[in-house]
Amino acid sequence: MGDIYKVSGPLVIGDNLDRPMLNEIVKIGKKNLFGEIIRIFQNKAMIQVYEPTEGLKPGDNITQTGEMFQVELGPGMLKNVFDGIQRPLEGNSIFLEHGFLFHSLDREKKWDFQPSKKIKKGDILKGGEIIGMIQETNTTDHKILVPPDIKGELVFFEKQGSYNVDKVVARIKTRTKIEDIKLYHKWPVRVPRPYNLKTRPEIPLRTGLRVIDFFFPAAQGGTIAIPGGFGTGKTQLIFNLIKWSDADVLIYIGCGERGNEVITVLEEISHLVIKGELLDERTIYIINTSNMPVAARTSGIFSGITIAEYFRDQGKKVAILADSITRWAEAMREISNRIGDFPGEEGYPTYLSSEIGNFFERAGNVVTLSGNKGSITTIGSISLYGSDFSDPVAQASMKVASCLWALDPNLAYVRHYPAINRNVSYSKHILFLRKYWEKYGNWYEYYHEFLNLFGKIDELEKLTSVMGKDMLAEDDQFLLEFNELFTELFLKQSALVIEDAHRDPIEQVKMAELLLTYYHRGKDALKKGISLEEISNKEIHSKLIKLKTLRKNKYIEQIDELINELIFVKKND
Ligand SMILES: Nc1ncnc2c1ncn2[C@@H]1O[C@H](COP(=O)(O)OP(=O)(O)OP(=O)(O)O)[C@@H](O)[C@H]1O
Ligand SMILES: [Mg+2]
């Protein structure tokens, strides 16, 4: 047992510790506050404390546990709200009881355990193998796994029944001892869980947002960074992804945002019904608001990704959404400054980039230890000052992000939502997803056609800013008018208008077809001497704009009708 030498904000310097280990968890003071050793020097250790440190004083006891920080993985996480060290938060309260003694998973609650029919006593089981199932919520079945680091003969297997998470449902004889397998196991958050194989991305994480799915699509298993200035719509976009992305399990990490905002998000999400299912049933919330201890913010990210890996190991598609990476980085900065580390860029620790990498790189598509396919898609927002992409958090994230959805304050200012800047954003998944999109028509062809047009549009816009629109040739003027229509109909999509908020891939491709048909027929008509006024007349435009809020059942049909109608003829013909 050691004692406190000094208290400094969220840090405590411990003395007289017995062979302290890096990342070892310790209990501090009379209240047994939760702490983690983050530096060891001579005979002292620097400890970050995951709770308010008021009341601690030199001489108070420190008890070592000999363990790293681990999360509990088992049924009872879905629909639940935890803080950064996986303490359950009561109801939607974000204020915590102090203390070390807590269980992440409810010990009283009973679950219906269905043992797997594929295994029997005497079988040799490997880590990651599925031994049974619990229907945890209406939407989500929870597979019970042999912990990844255990292998041996099944010497006891419990029958079907209603048990709490502490129940031993199997015993495995390893080379050295007999291991009890319960309905949950623990795993250290800093250690990525093993898998068999990483595989290529091939299925998109559909968002229902045209500008993203069509131009900057992310694959399941990808890494997505959402940088943007203050109020550009980062949270709204993440919210949209929670609502519409087709993941089996969602993990929302509210990291360092304002408490009241987070509560609003929680309340909204927990009541949402999407495609007939309550979203809550497949969502886990990890919350560390700006008024909660800074150290817990640094661990919420790793608790979240470890929980994500656990569901991936069950063969599920997981999406993890962190809002925001910047607040997490700021928490790291605060701790590292207090330790007195040599500061890197803008005072962030020199290990910032590798920490962000450690988080994002745990995403991916895998073949699990039990031979199933699972994936983690990792999404993080980044707060920028204006559009300053030299920001160290943005730079570190861009190194590992397979997609960048950059939000532009100038677009947000004119209420162009989602405020995606198409010149800065990118997706490295276009080619991987080509095959998937083939079943929805000519996406790949249209995609390239639009890219070509974007190039011309950008040039023309530069020109007109100098010499005005009237000096342009008629077909260039038409292209600029077309761009306005295209922006309104395709790029803009309000999250707040229910009919507009989400479009399926088939609807997106159909809309692209309509717009390109309009463009080509318009250009041909110009060649035939039909005037620009006749082509871009208000009547046609208003018909097109009405499509925005058209309900799903009429959408495709109506677009097909419009495609047939769009014939430009000379008035006196
Ligand atoms: N897709 C959208 N559709 C409609 N309105 C939107 C959309 N995105 C953002 N907004 C509007 O912009 C406001 C600010 O968005 P949001 O809170 O998501 O920004 P933020 O980038 O997360 O801000 P902060 O920097 O404070 O975290 C929203 O309250 C909403 O009014
Ligand atoms: Mg926000």
Image: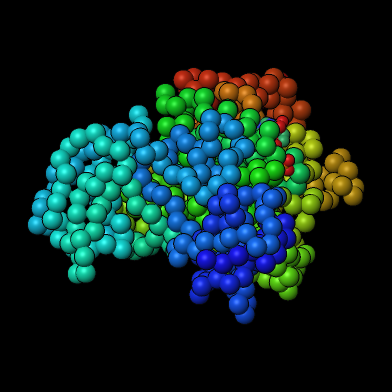
Going by the picture, which residue comes out furthest to the right?
Answer: 467
Lateral position of residue 121 relative to residue 486, left or right: left
- Quadrant field for ligand 1: top right
Q: Nearer the viewer, residue 296 or 515?
A: 296
Q: Quadrant of residue 537?
A: top right
Q: Quadrant of the C terminus?
A: top right
Residue at image point 63% right, 30% down: 264
Instruction: Return the x and y of residue 161 as percentages of the image width and height.
Output: 20, 35
Q: Is residue 540 above or below residue 48?
A: above
Residue at image point 62% right, 80% down: 42
Lateral position of residue 165 relative to residue 319, left or right: left
Residue at image point 46% right, 20% down: 553
Instruction: Return the x and y of residue 116 as percentages of the image width and height.
Output: 18, 44
Going by the picture, which residue comes out furthest to the bottom?
Answer: 42
Whether residue 452 can be seen here: no
Q: Is residue 48 above or below residue 471?
A: below
Q: How many marks?
A: 0
Lateral position of residue 335 relative to residue 200, left or right: right
Residue at image point 60% right, 77% down: 43
Q: Nearer the viewer, residue 263 or 571?
A: 263
Q: Nearer the viewer, residue 501 or 447?
A: 501
Lateral position of residue 160 relative to residue 381, left or right: left
Instruction: Return the x and y of residue 550 as percentages of the image width and height.
Output: 56, 20
Instruction: Return the x and y of residue 354 as percentages of the image width and height.
Output: 59, 68
Q: Nearer the viewer, residue 304 or 21?
A: 21
Q: Is residue 391 above or below residue 220?
A: below
